[in-house]
Amino acid sequence: MTPVEPHLFYTGVVAQLYAPLRSIVPDPEPYARFIATSGQPALELGCGTGDPLLDLRGRGLDIEGLDSSADMLARCQSEAAGRGLDVVLHHQPMESMDLARGYRSIFLAGPTFNLLADDDTARHALERVRAHLQPQGQALIPLFLPAATPPEDLGRTREHTSPDGTCMRVTPIAEERDEFRRNQTTILRYELITDHEDIVEERPWLLHWHTQAGFHRLATEAGLAVRAVLRPDGTAATPTDQAFVFILANPTSAA
């Protein structure tokens, strides 16, 4: 099955099941600290349904969100309205974003950058990040090296049942891995079961990974300076870390 781009993957039943079935909810505190250091206004790339964007907006921060999926943004807007928040959302892919203002802080809350299908797309996204960074602004980009799904985990279902009895499930059923292209495609089966209907869809979920050296090169080619490479806990990354965070800036920005 051919992988689909993120704006097509995160639609329909996948967008509906995303929040209930996610395994991790981003902690807003690291991003609040990043914005406190780098400054406002801020922009969250791949903001999805609004975590941690809406929490940060609720603190009064000047922050906007961008995502390529209209369905995910609609859910984010609905959640914002439910919280009584006014938030600016942009429906654009990060690799071609063209916004009217610049930002002191640009970040992704989790390794959403790994959804970009290849190095060329990643480079374009980094070029657009640089174009939208104000002087002395910084970008925070988390990345990880995905491990192959263990064979015993294929077919293992993650499930959530809502108070009204609606059953939501996601199951990895097959996987292909291309070490040369640094791509991993997992076929995910989504199920939404209610008293009235059963919806079942299978979609290919693509992850493209970067080594630290490879991403450093891409960032430099895009005209960005690498300020730091950190572990998720904020300490200095080592070359063998499987998850790491790049802090990037314009070359003219202050160190």
Image: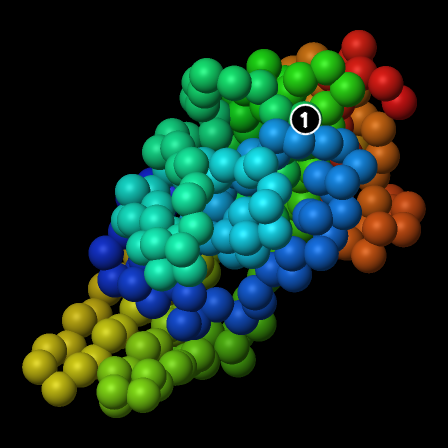
Q: Tell me what residue is drawn at x 21 percent, y 70 percent.
A: 200
Given residues 200 and 41, the one toward you in this image is 41
Residue drawn at (21%, 80%) of the image: 193
Q: Is residue 17 above or below residue 44?
A: below
- For residue 41, what is the image quadrant? top right
**Is the residue 33 above or below the residue 202 in the image?**
above
Q: Residues within 10 Å of mark 1 (few under 14, many from 20)?
A: many
- Which quarter of the rendering shows the C terminus? top right
Q: Is residue 99 above or below residue 233?
A: above
The answer to whether residue 154 is left or right of residue 162 is right
In this rendering, does residue 210 appear at all? no
What SS does tag 1 mark? Answer: strand
The location of residue 218, given as percent across then percent down, is 68, 23
Three-letter code, disc 1? Arg
- Viewer-proximal residue, 42 or 158? 42
Furthest residue in direction top, as rendered? 252
- Left or right of residue 94: residue 71: left
> Which residue is at a point 70% across and 48% down the rendered structure image?
32
* Residue at (11% x, 78% y) in the render: 197
Rendering quarter of residue 97: top left
Instruction: Please indicate, yes or no, whether residue 31 appears anywhere in the rendered image.
Output: yes
Left or right relative to 198: residue 2: right
Residue at numbered disc 1: 104
Percent x, y of residue 131: 58, 14
